[in-house]
Amino acid sequence: MFRFFLALLFIASNFISAQNVKPKNIIILIGDGMGINYVGASLLQDSNSPFKEFKSIGLSITCSADKLITDSAAGATAIATGYLTNNKYVSVDPLGKPLYTIFELAKKRGLSTGIVVTSSVAHATPGAFVAHTKDRNDQTEIASQMIDKNIDVVIGGGLKYFLPKNLAGVRDDDRNLIEVLKSKNYSLPKNYVELNSLKESTKNLYALLESDGLPESTKRNYTLGDLTNNALKHLKRNSKGFVLMIEGSQIDWAGHDHKSKELLTEMKDFVTAVKAALVFAKENKNTLVLITSDHETGGMSITNGNLDATDIELSYTSGGHTPSPVGIFSFGPGENIFKAIMHINQIGQKLFQILDPSKKF
Ligand SMILES: [Zn+2]
């Protein structure tokens, strides 16, 4: 009888520890503006959609500290810090005080950090992971703060925010941040071919592939998934793990402009990154993959189409963002804690508590 009791205790403790498994690597995928209907359109058009592999699904309420309808700065701040702030604020609280970010915590714990976006790397969403400012439009300031954060891998556009005006940049302070990165021994591939040909090395990298945002997905010969694979190739060398943030930045831009064709192709591009993250997570089982959005854009709905959805009609009720809740899709160790309805900053709180269980909010 006593042995039987011990066996039960053993099974129960194993069950509890399986529930509490902490991931070593965290991959956060943000579809900017990607409301539920965006995911719905993608699902209708792709019967093998990788979204179907996610079993833990939640909803995020995206209102900011001062507005029912958030912008990307406050939305990304909530995910990156665990706190709500005002629209336009980048990882500072409503009084302007800096908020500690998940990237800052990851670095302190010895993890690597990475950013892959299709906008400028100094745009509001990546900015919230690396900088503190009340003005999301001050991309030169975000770039200045970013180079001091020793991010391991940065891939996207936005070269002009790192260069002075006499070198085709937009910086008023005449600083050349690319020279600073060279002095810090960063690899600086100038285009996708150079990035893709880099061997896994001990060097960190900044791949600023365009002056501002990247071309839309149909006008470049590489996908967000290709960029993601390049980031993972370099980040995986850290035995302590990494936190990687990937953004499908231009999904939102297509939603603002009611450009349905582009919206669907940007979603397809985002899905290539989801696939890349899932392949990595299956090979490296200590990896959590989390997909969410900062807000919905355009009040988009699917209003017509043929049966296999190869030709669908999208309609819009807004030229801006809306407060419609967005999805949370999680896969891997720790996925269960995101399976709920929560406010957007609780996503950030849960990410912090994965890295530091003692962290209180
Ligand atoms: Zn927007």
Image: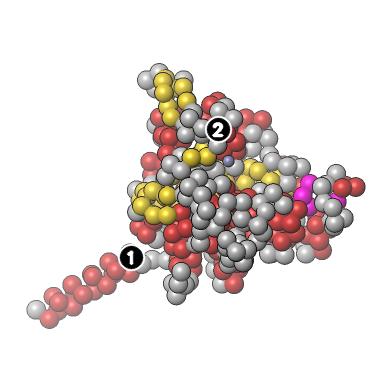
Q: What percent of the width, then of the height, locates residue 321?
A: 52, 39
Q: What percent of the width, then of the height, locates residue 213?
A: 69, 41
Hey, which quadrant is residue 222 in on the image?
A: top right
Q: Amino acid at mark 1?
A: Ala
**Closer to the camera in the image, 55 or 94:** 94
Label 2: which residue?
319
- Quadrant (top left/top right/bottom left/bottom right) for the N terminus: bottom left
Quarter of image, ligand 1:
top right
Hey, which quadrant is residue 40 in on the image?
A: top left
Label 1: which residue?
18
Answer with mark 1 or mark 2, whichever residue precedes in sequence.
1
Residue 265 appears in the figure: no
Numbered badge on residue 4: none
**Closer to the camera in the image, 82 or 109:** 82
**Left or right of 118: which side holds 30?**
left
Q: Which residues are magenta?
A: 160-164
> Is the image coloured rainbow, by chain, by secondary structure, or in one colour?
secondary structure
Q: Amino acid at mark 2?
A: Gly
Q: Residue at point 46% right, 39% down?
A: 35
